[in-house]
């Protein structure tokens, strides 16, 4: 049983690290691409119309939602809620089996 718990903890930690890597990769891409677009914007029209902000805003919304999912910032249906709900449903299932 102890080996199962260790393996379960390892798999959860590995999943968490994978989510963090994906988020930081996305964030790095965002910074590099938006910086390049800003440079192109400046070179082509010297900030007369800052069109790169549209891309920054759109992608920024995606980054925000990615961060909410990665760092479990959703107060209503976050990972903690999910874990509690899973345990609750498992307990209910055990109770039903006892009465069968």
Image: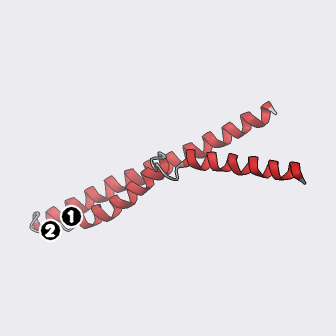
Of all residues shown, which one is farthest toward the front? 99
Q: Quadrant of residue 35?
A: bottom left
Circle 2 is placed at which residue position?
44
The relative height of residue 40 versus residue 9 in the rendered view (above or below) is below
Q: Quadrant of residue 9?
A: top right
Which of 90 and 43 lies nearest the eye of the viewer?
Answer: 90
Which of 50 and 16 lies nearest the eye of the viewer?
Answer: 16
Crowdedness of circle 2 by 10 Å Cα count: few (<14), some, many (20+)? few
Q: Residue at x 47, y 45 (%)?
A: 71
Crowdedness of circle 1 by 10 Å Cα count: few (<14), some, many (20+)? few
Total marks shown come to 2
Q: Residue at x 39, y 60 (%)?
A: 62
| Quadrant that contains the N terminus | top right
Of all residues shown, which one is farthest toward the top? 2
Which of 93 and 58 lies nearest the eye of the viewer?
Answer: 93
Question: Are discs 2 and 1 less than 8 Å apart at CB?
Answer: yes
Circle 1 is placed at which residue position?
40
Image position, residue 22 (x, y; %)? 49, 51
Q: Is residue 37 left or right of residue 26?
A: left
The relative height of residue 1 versus residue 17 in the rendered view (above or below) is above
For label 2, the SS is helix
Q: Residue at x 69, y 46 (%)?
A: 87
Which of 59 and 89 lies nearest the eye of the viewer?
Answer: 89
Q: How is the image coloured?
A: secondary structure
For label 1, the SS is helix
Image position, residue 7 (x, y; %)? 73, 38
Label 2 and label 1: CA atoms lie apart by 6 Å
Of all residues shown, which one is farthest toward the right? 100
| Quadrant that contains the C terminus | bottom right
Image position, residue 43 (x, y; %)? 15, 63
Q: Quadrant of residue 29?
A: bottom left
Image position, residue 5 (x, y; %)? 74, 35
């Amino acid at each position: 049983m102890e080996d199962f718990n260790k393996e379960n903890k390892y798999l959860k930690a590995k999943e968490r690290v994978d989510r963090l890597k994906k988020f930081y990769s996305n964030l790095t891409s965002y910074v590099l691409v938006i910086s390049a677009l800003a440079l192109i914007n400046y070179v082509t029209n010297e900030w007369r119309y800052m069109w790169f902000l549209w891309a920054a805003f759109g992608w920024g919304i995606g980054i925000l939602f990615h961060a909410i999912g990665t760092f479990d910032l959703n107060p209503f249906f976050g990972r903690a809620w999910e874990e509690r709900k899973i345990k609750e449903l498992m307990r209910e299932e055990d109770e039903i089996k006892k009465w069968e």
